[in-house]
Image: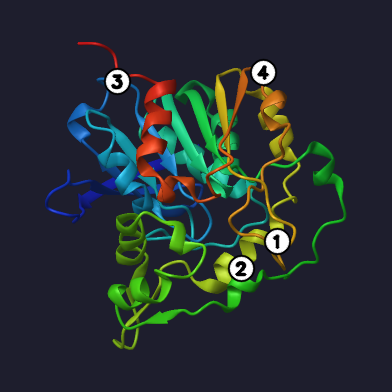
């Protein structure tokens, strides 16, 4: 798998460690990756973070602030944040993207942290590049019962309602003000929501305000393909490393057309891994990493404690 890397400085809050922005050529496209505490690379296992659909690498900032002493790489998936957008045939493409990133950084024994669709992709990346990961934490992964992948596929070109979401904002503050009291964003830690807004926009081409960095049409094309990647089942069963499956509260069927705060994860998933464990947080939502960054950091530290000096 070919991969190449260049890097430039990335700007973040002056009170926090400053990540370095790398541009990775992987699987035929350029992906943006943020490296925190680069001087620690190789001193302990890298924490490799992958976000959910519609978000970006910097939604992990508040979790990372709770992980002092950690070398961290957070990825903008294709079509998100500062990464290139490109068509895809199934979610397997996102896994191959991540596998190329892991190879470009020459990771060995990294701790992979994935959320939602990002967790699905991370499972495949770890199967494609198995020596590069020592264990995984999958936060409310979009991973279904094996039989679900054999149901009739969603018609080609089907878009999720997110394709019609508001795309233009006067500023990051305007985006924050609009979302602060609206679910699902209303459950976010306030600074996590600010990070999402601050790093989730790009200047509009006409110079008038900002557009979402993940275009609504691209986001809307991802969700309908959730069960159209049967190869992920083989990837799950191929992994020989410890895997922690973190599940949020169950979906509430009374919330129509669907409950965005409920878990999409098959409750039996952990049992499909050779070394899987299940943690169920019935008081947390699908957006746990942004809802409770401190808890997310504690889970990471529990599965992969830093070596004692």
Would you say residue 104 is visible in this rendering? Answer: no
Real-space CA distance between mark 1 and mark 3, rounded to the nearest whole angstrom: 38 Å
Q: Residue at x 28, y 13 (%)?
A: 307
Rendered position, 76 above or below 160: above
- Please say if the residues under marks 3 and 4 sit with CB atoms less than 8 Å apart: no
Rendered position, 34 above or below 146: below
| Most foreground residue, 9 or 288 | 288
As drawn, the label of residue 220 is 2
Q: Secondary structure at mark 4?
A: loop
Near mark 2 (Cα within 10 A), the count class, few <14, some 14-19 or many ≥20, is many
In the picture, measured across the screen, residue 247 lies left or right of residue 78, that is right
- Please say if the residues under marks 2 and 1 sit with CB atoms less than 8 Å apart: yes
Near mark 3 (Cα within 10 A), the count class, few <14, some 14-19 or many ≥20, is some
Q: Secondary structure at mark 1?
A: helix
**Sequence order check, earlier mark of 3 and 4:** 3
Real-space CA distance between mark 3 and mark 2, rounded to the nearest whole angstrom: 38 Å
Name the residue beneath numbered marker 1.
224
Real-space CA distance between mark 2 and mark 1, rounded to the nearest whole angstrom: 8 Å
Real-space CA distance between mark 1 and mark 4, rounded to the nearest whole angstrom: 29 Å
**Sequence order check, earlier mark of 3 and 2:** 3
Q: Quadrant of the C terminus?
A: top left
């Amino acid at each position: 798998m070919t991969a190449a890397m260049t890097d430039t400085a990335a700007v973040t809050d002056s009170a926090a460690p400053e990540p370095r922005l790398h541009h990775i050529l992987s699987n035929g496209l350029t992906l943006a990756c943020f490296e925190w505490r680069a001087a620690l690379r190789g001193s302990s296992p890298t924490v490799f973070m992958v976000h959910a659909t519609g978000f970006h690498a910097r939604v992990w900032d508040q979790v990372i602030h709770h992980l002092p002493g950690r070398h961290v790489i957070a990825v903008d998936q294709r079509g998100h944040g500062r990464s290139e957008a490109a068509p895809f045939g199934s979610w397997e493409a996102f896994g191959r993207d991540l596998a190329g990133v892991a190879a470009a950084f020459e990771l060995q024994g990294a701790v992979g942290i994935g959320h939602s669709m990002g967790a699905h992709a991370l499972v495949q990346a770890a199967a494609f590049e198995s020596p590069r990961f020592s264990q995984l934490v999958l936060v409310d992964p979009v991973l279904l019962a094996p039989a679900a992948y054999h149901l009739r596929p969603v018609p080609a070109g089907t878009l999720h309602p997110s394709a019609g979401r508001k795309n233009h904002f006067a500023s990051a503050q305007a985006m924050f003000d609009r979302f602060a009291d609206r679910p699902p964003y209303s459950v976010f830690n306030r600074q996590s929501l600010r990070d999402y807004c601050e790093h989730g926009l790009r200047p509009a081409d006409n110079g008038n305000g900002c557009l979402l960095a993940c275009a609504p049409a691209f986001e809307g094309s991802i969700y309908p393909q959730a069960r159209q990647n049967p190869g992920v089942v083989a990837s799950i069963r191929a992994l020989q490393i410890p895997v922690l499956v973190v599940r949020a509260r169950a979906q509430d069927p009374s919330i129509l057309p669907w409950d965005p705060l409920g878990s999409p994860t098959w409750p039996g998933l952990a049992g499909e891994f050779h070394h899987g464990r299940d943690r169920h947080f019935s008081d947390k939502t699908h957006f746990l990493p942004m809802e409770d960054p401190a808890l997310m950091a504690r889970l990471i530290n529990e599965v992969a404690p830093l070596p004692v000096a």
